């Protein structure tokens, strides 16, 4: 069941809610694929991405909203966040390589 299609929620625009880790994780995954450092089949790419995102602390942003503590750009350019994303992808890659679904 798609929760967005629940009658009480249909009037809200959930497409504005973003997982802030996703662009960082996808950037690392793309780099690994481009350098031929991981299998590029859909199963492996999606498994690595899902495992990496699941291992990171939740961080969501509502687009077009202002937050005094952080902005999307500051989160995405933070060196520590980039390092955490890379580490999570590499851990996920090791797991998937040991148990591929392709």
Image: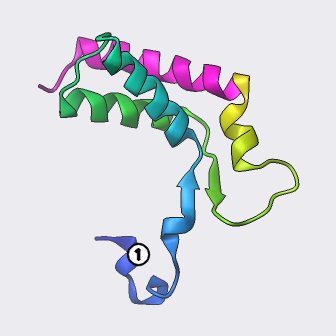
Disc tally is 1
Label 1 CA crowd tier, 10 Å (few <14, some 14–19, many 20+): some
Q: Nearer the viewer, residue 51 or 45?
A: 45
Q: Main secondary structure of the magenta part?
A: helix
Q: Quadrant of the C terminus?
A: top left
Q: Position of residue 63 (x, y in %)?
A: 63, 63
State the residue lying farthest toward the left.
102
From the image, which quarter does the N terminus lie in? bottom left
- Asked if residue 78 is among those painted magenta in the image, a careful observer would answer no
Please give the range of residues in magenta.
Answer: 80-102
x and y, in percent, of residue 90 in the image = 45, 15
Looking at the image, which residue sits at the far front? 34
Rendered view: 74 above or below 95: below
Residue at x-position 32% and y-position 10%: 37
Please tell me whether residue 5 is drawn above or below residue 99 in the rendered image: below
Residue 96 colored in magenta in the image: yes
Along the line of sight, which residue is nearer the eye, 8 or 38?
38
- The residue that appears at 55% across and 55% down in the rendered structure is 18
The extreme right residue here reads 68
Looking at the image, residue 44 sits to the left or right of residue 77; the answer is left
Q: Secondary structure at mark 1?
A: helix
Which color scheme is applied? rainbow
Residue that appears at 33% across and 18% down: 34
In the drawing, does residue 81 fall left or right of residue 16?
right
Q: Which image quarter: residue 73?
A: top right
Quarter where residue 91 is shown = top left
Residue position for label 1: 4
Where is residue 99 drawn, in percent x and y?
Answer: 22, 18
Residue 58 point in image, percent of width and height: 60, 45
């Amino acid at each position: 069941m798609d929760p967005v299609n629940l009658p009480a929620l249909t009037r809200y625009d959930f497409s504005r809610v973003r997982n802030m880790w996703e662009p960082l994780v996808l950037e690392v995954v793309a780099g690994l694929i481009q350098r031929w450092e991981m299998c590029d089949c859909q199963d492996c790419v999606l498994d690595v991405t899902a495992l990496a995102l699941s291992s990171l602390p939740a961080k969501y942003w509502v687009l077009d909203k202002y937050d005094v503590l952080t902005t999307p750009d500051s989160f995405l350019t933070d060196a520590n966040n980039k390092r955490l994303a890379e580490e999570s992808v590499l851990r996920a890659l090791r797991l998937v390589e040991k148990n591929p679904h392709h």
